[in-house]
Image: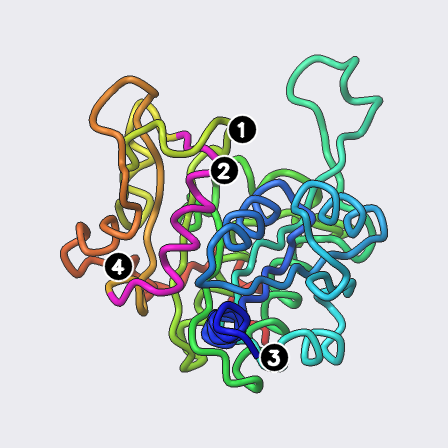
């Protein structure tokens, strides 16, 4: 074996194996791509559909060995996907579908969640299964991409789809289900980083000053958007940054051209000065979300 080949083998063996769930989504795909561009990581993308497999192979440059097709509600499939992984980045989320008839009516359009794809099923039960599988697999760090607004039961995002308190209970309360999963992760014993991005925009990474906070305080800012590509940068940094361990934070940015560009996303974690989001207060609206297992 020549010297170059030995170096390649050593590099491959020392790279952290990272499972990116929801790698077919817009944020998950960026996380996968950025990890793949670094010799420090060996990413595996978990996607749900054949279409997502093709897209990740094309855009992310992934080969068949780096893609797993599975549903996050399938515990056995998750266990197999996480075997041998050092870390996990959870980018899964329920995705609402707009009701076409509502577009022509005055007011805000209405949405629904597909059967099997409600916030309760994806953002709570699916996330819980991922956390359980990661713990069983001996994963060292679990990065959870959630959303700002989890302290606000009346946040408009919770009104998308039918809420559990409504007649059919087919969806809704997405931020509350995410928050319940976050609390489960914190109590799991896994080393974690929870990231709550503000409004996600499809803009280039590394062109803005990123801002961090806790407990939805950034929602008071006039500007609280953040590029998906910068969220991906922060996720990648969280996998190895010591200050990111057991930390829950909110993430936004300043408008492009304002402030100093954040060149090192890993520095954001320590800039919080030990602060982390507070989960000691159990939200009770609706109470069924936090009362059930």
Residue placed under numbered mark 3 in the picture: 133
Q: Position of residue 153 (x, y in %)?
A: 47, 47
* Numbered badge on residue 228: 2
Q: Which residues are magenta?
A: 225-242
The residue under the point 21% across, 24% down is: 259
- Image quadrant containing the C terminus: bottom right
Q: Secondary structure at mark 3?
A: helix
Quarter residue 68 falls in: bottom right
Residue 123 sits above or below residue 109 on the image: below
Residue placed under numbered mark 1 in the picture: 202
Quarter residue 25 falls in: top right
Q: Are marks 2 and 3 in contact (CB under 8 Å)?
A: no
Q: Secondary structure at mark 4?
A: loop
Q: Pick out the residue farthest to the front.
A: 2
Q: Are marks 2 and 1 in contact (CB under 8 Å)?
A: yes
Q: Which numbered disc, 1 or 3, marks the residue that appears first in the sequence?
A: 3
Residue placed under numbered mark 4 in the picture: 276
Residue 125 within the magenta-colored segment of the rendering: no
Q: Are marks 3 and 4 in contact (CB under 8 Å)?
A: no
Q: Residues within 10 Å of mark 1 (few under 14, many from 20)?
A: few
């Amino acid at each position: 074996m020549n010297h170059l080949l030995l170096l390649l083998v050593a590099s491959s063996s020392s790279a952290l194996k990272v499972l990116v769930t929801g790698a077919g989504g817009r944020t998950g795909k960026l996380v996968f791509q950025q990890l793949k561009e670094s010799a420090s990581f060996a990413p595996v993308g978990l996607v749900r559909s054949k279409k997502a497999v093709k897209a990740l192979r094309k855009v992310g440059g992934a080969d068949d060995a780096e893609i797993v097709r599975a549903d996050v509600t399938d515990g056995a499939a998750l266990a197999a996907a996480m075997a041998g992984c050092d870390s996990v980045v959870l980018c899964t989320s329920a995705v609402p579908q707009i009701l076409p008839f509502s577009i022509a009516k005055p007011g805000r359009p209405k949405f629904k969640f597909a059967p099997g794809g409600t916030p309760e099923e994806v953002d709570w039960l699916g996330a819980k299964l991922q956390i359980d599988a990661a713990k069983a697999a001996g994963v060292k760090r679990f990065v959870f991409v959630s959303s700002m607004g989890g302290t606000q039961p009346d946040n408009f995002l919770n009104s998308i789809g039918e809420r559990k308190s409504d007649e059919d209970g087919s969806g809704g309360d997405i931020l509350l289900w995410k928050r319940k999963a976050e609390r489960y992760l914190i109590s799991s014993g896994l080393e974690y980083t929870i990231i709550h991005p503000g409004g996600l925009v499809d803009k280039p990474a590394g062109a803005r000053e990123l801002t961090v906070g806790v407990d939805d305080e950034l929602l008071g800012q006039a500007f609280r958007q953040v590029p998906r590509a910068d969220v991906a940068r922060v996720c990648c940094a969280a996998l190895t940054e010591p200050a990111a361990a057991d930390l829950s934070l909110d993430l936004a940015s300043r408008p492009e051209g304002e402030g100093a560009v954040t060149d090192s996303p890993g520095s954001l974690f320590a800039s919080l000065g030990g602060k982390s989001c507070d989960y000691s207060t159990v939200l009770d609206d609706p109470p069924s979300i936090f009362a059930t297992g």
